[in-house]
Image: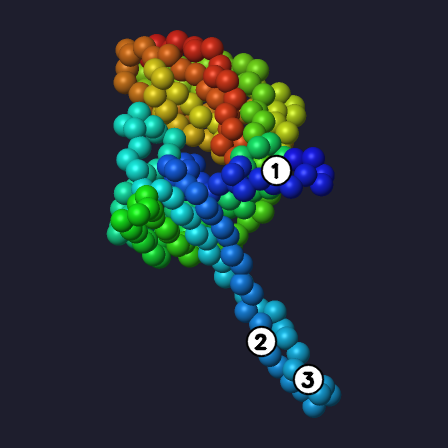
């Protein structure tokens, strides 16, 4: 966002595992530092010494059932289920706009309240306790450059070598992972360094005499994906 422009509350949302809450109305993140009060023979007043911090978040929403084909959002029942199952969640606090602020961390839902007053719409509120660090970064919505090429070699009955070539630089912040697909199904992932220009991967565990189409893509740290490569057909010996 341009310098000096105030963020609109409507645009800032909490995401849980990459999904927002259906009909959310309010969200917040709170950070509290633990201060140790100490005094010495050389001071008249107490000195506050910062120690660890803890953080929490809250989310409010109207209570409504989302459509069955809505796969990008949670319903209030999803959050209650997460709490009952003691599920750790990935929380984000952001507009989602490239370059804007982004806070991320792990949370547990420690309280859920569903309220249904006669004169008002039913509403829900959810409280989260941070588990570990709260990280800050800028939103990166830029997809990595497509993989330049893939090729195969050393084909045997049950394995082959797959070589991939990347652009340099391949992303505005750097890629982190290569995904390898067999017949459109994810088969293998490989960690990739930010400054990588390519590499070779051994693909194994295949059946002799079978044929499959292989393609790849890369992703960065904020789960932006490149386009897929063209498929390469491989027949095991």
Say which element carries label 3.
Answer: loop
Q: How is the image coloured?
A: rainbow
Secondary structure, mark 1, is loop
Quarter-wise, where is residue 179 in the image? top left
Q: Position of residue 201 (x, y in %)?
A: 46, 25
Q: Which mark is residue 100?
A: 1
Q: Quadrant of the C terminus?
A: top left
Quadrant in which the N terminus appears: top right
- 10 Å crowding of disc 1: few (<14), some (14-19), many (20+): some
Is 88 placed above or below 212 here?
below
| Mark-to-mark CA distance, 1 and 2 | 34 Å
Q: Earlier in the sequence, mark 1 or mark 2?
A: 2
Question: Mark 3 and mark 2 in contact (Cβ < 8 Å)?
Answer: no
Q: Which mark is residue 183?
A: none
Which residue position holds label 2? Answer: 36
Residue drawn 34% across the image and 28% down it: 70
* 160 relative to 211, above or below: below
Q: From the top left corner, tell me how far across and down residue 36 is, in percent.
A: 58, 76
Q: Position of residue 178 (x, y in %)?
A: 48, 27
> Which of disc 3 and disc 1 is earlier in sequence?
3
Q: Closer to the N terminus: mark 2 or mark 3?
A: 2
Which residue lies at the image location 49% right of the left edge and 14% below the top edge?
229
**Image quadrant where residue 168 sits:** top right
**Residue behind mark 3:** 45
Identity of the residue drawn at 39% across and 27% down: 188
In the displayed structure image, the side of residue 179 where residue 6 appears, left or right: right
Residue 166 percent location from the top left of the image? 58, 21
């Amino acid at each position: 966002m341009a310098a000096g422009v105030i963020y609109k509350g409507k645009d800032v949302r909490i995401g849980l595992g990459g999904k927002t809450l259906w009909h959310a109305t309010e969200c917040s993140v709170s950070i509290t530092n633990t201060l140790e009060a100490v005094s010495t023979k050389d001071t008249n007043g107490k000195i506050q010494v910062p120690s660890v911090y803890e953080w929490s978040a809250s989310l409010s929403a109207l209570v409504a059932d989302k459509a069955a084909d809505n796969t990008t959002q949670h319903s209030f029942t999803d959050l209650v289920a997460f709490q009952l199952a003691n599920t750790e969640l990935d929380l984000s606090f952001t507009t989602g706009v490239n370059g804007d602020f982004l806070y991320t961390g792990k949370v547990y839902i420690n309280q859920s309240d569903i309220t249904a007053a006669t004169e008002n719409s039913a509403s829900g509120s959810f409280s989260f306790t941070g588990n570990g660090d709260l990280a800050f970064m800028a939103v990166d919505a830029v997809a990595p450059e497509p993989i330049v090429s893939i090729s195969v070699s050393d084909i045997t009955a049950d394995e082959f070598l797959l070589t991939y070539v990347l652009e340099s630089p391949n992303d505005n912040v750097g890629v982190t992972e290569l995904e390898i697909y067999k017949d459109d199904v994810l088969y293998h992932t490989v960690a990739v360094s930010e400054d990588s220009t390519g590499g070779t991967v051994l693909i194994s565990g295949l059946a002799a005499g079978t044929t499959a189409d292989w393609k790849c893509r890369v992703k960065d740290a904020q789960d932006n994906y490149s386009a897929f490569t063209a498929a390469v057909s491989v027949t095991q010996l």
